[in-house]
Amino acid sequence: MRDVAVLGVGMHPWGKFADRSVTQMCRVATEAALQDAGIEWREVEAVAAASSRFSGGKGWGLNGNDVVEDMGSTGIPVYNLSAGCAAGGNAFNIGWTLVASGAHDCVLVVGGEKMPKGFIQTSGLEEETDPEHLRQLCVGMPGPAFWAALCRRRMQDFGTSHEDLARIAVKAHQIGKHNTNARFRQEFSIEDVLNSAMVSYPLHLYEICPVSDGAAAVLICSADIARKRTTRPVWVASSSVATARFDDGLPRGLGTVVPQTGPTCHSEASIAVGNALEKAGVAPTELDLVELQDNTVFYELAFPEDWGLCQPGEAERLVEKGETLPTGKLPINPSGGFLCFGEATTAMGVFQICELTWQLREQAGPRQVPGAKIGLGQTLGLGGNATAAVLKN
Amino acid sequence: MTMHERIPVTEGLFAETAAGPRLLGSRCRTCSTPYFPRSLSCHNPECGESQMEDADFGPRGSLWSCAIQNYPPPLPARYEEPYTPYAVGVVDLDEGLRVVARMSVDDLDSLQLDAEVELTIEPIYRDEDGREVTTWKFKPLQSTAK
C-alpha cells in the first residue's frame, strides 16, 4: 500500500440551516477543502461520499453524485457509502483505499447531512422483521435510553456520579466555545448541566448530543502529489472499518447472548480502533489526541478504557483532573465533539478528519493540543458499524 | 366491570403458556446459542452447523441495567396522553439470553441493578378501539423499597 496524505480539509459550520440544501452545504465544504489543498475540481479523480440518511442523494443515498453534478460532471467514479452514523468514516476508509492501492492519486471524501427536528427514529423501516423497528414498537427504547442503560451499568460498577457525567459536558463546552464551526458555543457549569431537562435518566439534555445540519470534506492524495503541493503534509497512518462481534453483550435489537467472557462493549469500535493502532504501529499511550463519537458523555468514559488508553474505572478521575482537555495527558475531542456540534450523522467521520488535520498542523487556535503529532478518529453506526483512522504529521 | 379485550403489540414474540408467560425465540441445537426473536440461522461464527429450533425463554432473570424514558418516544412507539414516563430494562435471563424490555414497576426510582426479575405480559396503551395493547415486561421479584 502507498502512503496517503491529507492535503486539504474544509467544513460548513454545524447548525440548523433551513434555507440551504445538503448539496449546497457540501459545496461549501468541498470548495474549502480544494482551496486548502490547492487542487482544482478537475484534478479530483474520484469521490467517496457518505450516503446521507435524511437528505439529498435522490433518496437513494447518492450524495456523492449530487456533489459531482453540482461541482461539475467530469465523469469520475463515485462511491456512496452507507454505514449508519459511521458512513463518513467509511467513506474516508474507501477514499484512503483508492489512493493507497494506487487506483487514484487524488480523491475527495465528503459527508453532509441535514437532520429532521427533534429525536430521531433509529430504524428507517416499518417492518416487523426489522429488530430495530420491533425494539421501538414493543419496548420504546430510543437511542438516549440505550445510552442511559449503558451509563447506569457503569455507575453501578464504578460508582460514577452525576457530577462526573456533567463534568464531561462542561469540559466539551469549555473547548467548543472556541470553535467557530461549532453550533453550541456557550459555557455551562455543572449545575447548568444537572438542571437541564432529564432526557433519559441518568442522562440530561446537555449530556447527549442533539442533531444538527453540517458538511465536511477532505482531499486526500498520494505522497508524490503531497510533496509537490505542501511542505507540511498530514499522513494517514492507518484507516480501518469493523463490525460488531456476535458475543459482545451490547443490547442491540431485542436481544443478544450474555457475554461468556470479556466486558460488554461496542466491540465494533474496539476492533476498528485496535486494528487502526496496530496498522499504524502506534501504542494507545502514544496518541496525542482523540476525536471519538461522543453521542453521550458516557462514551467519553467508556471508550478510552475499552481501547486501552487508560485503566478501567480511571476515566472519571482523568476528566476531573483536566487530563482530557487539550492541555492534558489524554486530550479528547478538542473540537468540542458531538456535544458542541450536534450530530449531522453521516458527516461526522469526515468532520473528525478535518479536526485532526487542523490539530496536527497546529492550526486549531485556542483549542490546540500543544505539539500534537498523532491523532485518532473514531465513528460508530447502526448495524454494528465502526471506523477508525490514525493521522500523523 | 367488563374485561377489556387485549391484543399483543405484535404477533409471535411472547405468549401466556400453561407454565406462565414466555418469550418466543429459538436456540441452535449445535452450539446452544439462544435467540430472541426467533432466528432463521445461527449467528455464532464458531458454530459448526446452524440447526435452529423454537425455544421459549423466561420467566426469571436479573436486571443488568435500566433507564427511564422521560420524554415521549418517537414512533413507532405509542403511548396514551398525557404521557407518563416508563422504565426500560436490559435483563439477563437464566438461559443466557440478554433482552430489552419494559419494566413493570410503580416507583421508577426503586429499580435496582442485579435485582431478580420475572417476566409478565401487561398492557402499554389502549388503542383507538379501546383494546389493551400488551407487551412483555419484567417485574422485580420482591419489593426493593425500604
Image (cartoon, coloured by chain):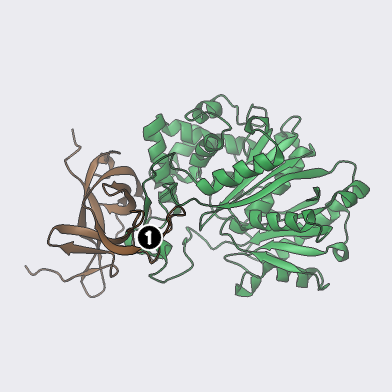
Chain colours: A green, B brown
Quadrant the C terminus of chain A occupies: top right
Residue B71 percent coordinates (x, y): 38, 53
Q: Which residue sits at x=44%, y=37%? A: A194
Q: Secondary structure at mark 1?
A: helix
Q: Is residue A86 left or right of residue A65?
A: left
**Chain containing mark 1:** A
A100 vs A325: above or below = below
**Going by the image, does A305 lie left or right of B39?**
right
Asked whether residue B80 appears in the rendered view, the answer is: no
- Residue A138, by quadrant, is bottom left
Residue A47 in the image: x percent, y percent? 75, 63
Q: Is residue A133 above or below residue A227?
A: below
Residue name at image x 63 percent, y 65 percent: A51
Looking at this view, name the residue that lies furthest to the right. A228
Residue B23, above or below B68: below
**Relative to A393, A205 lies left or right:** left
Residue at label 1?
A135
At 60% from the left and 27% from the top, the residue drawn is A323
The amino acid type found where label 1 is placed reads Arg
Residue A156 horizontal/vertical position (percent): 36, 34
Q: Is residue A360 visible?
A: yes
Q: Residue furthest left?
A: B1
Q: How many marks?
A: 1
Q: Quadrant of residue B126?
A: bottom left
Identify the residue at the far top of this view.
A321
Query: Residue drawn 34% across and 62% down?
Result: B37
Q: Nearer the viewer, residue A66 or A130?
A: A130
Which residue occupies the foreground of this view, A38 or B22?
A: B22
Residue A297 place in picture, x, y as percent: 51, 40
- Badge 1 crowding class, 10 Å Cα cut-off, few under 14, some 14 to 19, many 20 or more, is many
